[in-house]
Image: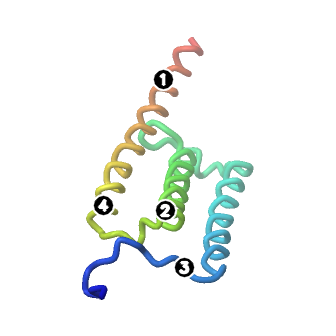
Amino acid sequence: MANHNLPSEHHESPEGTGWIWKVFWILLIVTTVEVALGIIKPEILMGKFLGTSVLNIIFIVLTLLKAFYIVAEFMHLKFERSNLIWTIALPVLILIPYLAFILLTEGGYMNVLMAQ
């Protein structure tokens, strides 16, 4: 006889196809915004902030949001305990923007050096 009070090692999968269509539309909208910003390149977003353009920062943030959403939905991270979610998310939230900042800053510096 199974004890139903113990936590299960198996997580319930979403039923039906509605959830996958929801994921599809959300990712499509975010990707469309990224592509539209890349084509239009609004002048208001071309100003510098922390050594790089605001548009680049928007691209980085949107890409990270998509990555977190994909991990939450398809790797079922949203069904895990919050401690595990923070253990995975916090280093990524700190390291990825930091490394992107360093990459963009050094890339800009190299561009200035090559122009001389």
Whether 93 is drawn above or below 8: the answer is above
Tell me the quarter of the image containing the N terminus. bottom left
Determine the CA span between mark 1 and mark 2. Answer: 38 Å
Judged from this view, the residue extending furthest toward the right is 39
Q: How many marks?
A: 4
Q: Amino acid at mark 3?
A: Pro
**Horizontal and vertical percent position of residue 65:** 50, 59
Q: Secondary structure at mark 1?
A: helix
| Residue plotted at (38% across, 49% down) | 92
Q: Amino acid at mark 4?
A: Trp
Determine the CA span between mark 1 and mark 3. Answer: 48 Å
Is the residue under label 3 in contact with that under label 4 (CB below 8 Å)? no
- Residue under numbered circle 1: 109
Determine the CA span between mark 3 and mark 2. Answer: 12 Å
Depth check, mark 2 against mark 4: the one in front is 2
Is the residue under label 2 in contact with that under label 1 (CB below 8 Å)? no
- Residue under numbered circle 4: 86
- Residue under numbered circle 3: 14
| Residue plotted at (57% across, 48% down) | 55
Q: Nearer the viewer, residue 113 or 15?
A: 15
Q: Amino acid at mark 1?
A: Tyr
Depth check, mark 4 against mark 3: the one in front is 3
**Horizontal and vertical percent position of residue 113:** 52, 15
**Horizontal and vertical percent position of residue 82:** 30, 69
Q: Earlier in the sequence, mark 4 or mark 3?
A: 3
Q: Which mark is residue 75?
A: 2
**Horizontal and vertical percent position of residue 79:** 40, 72
Residue 58 appears left or right of 3: right
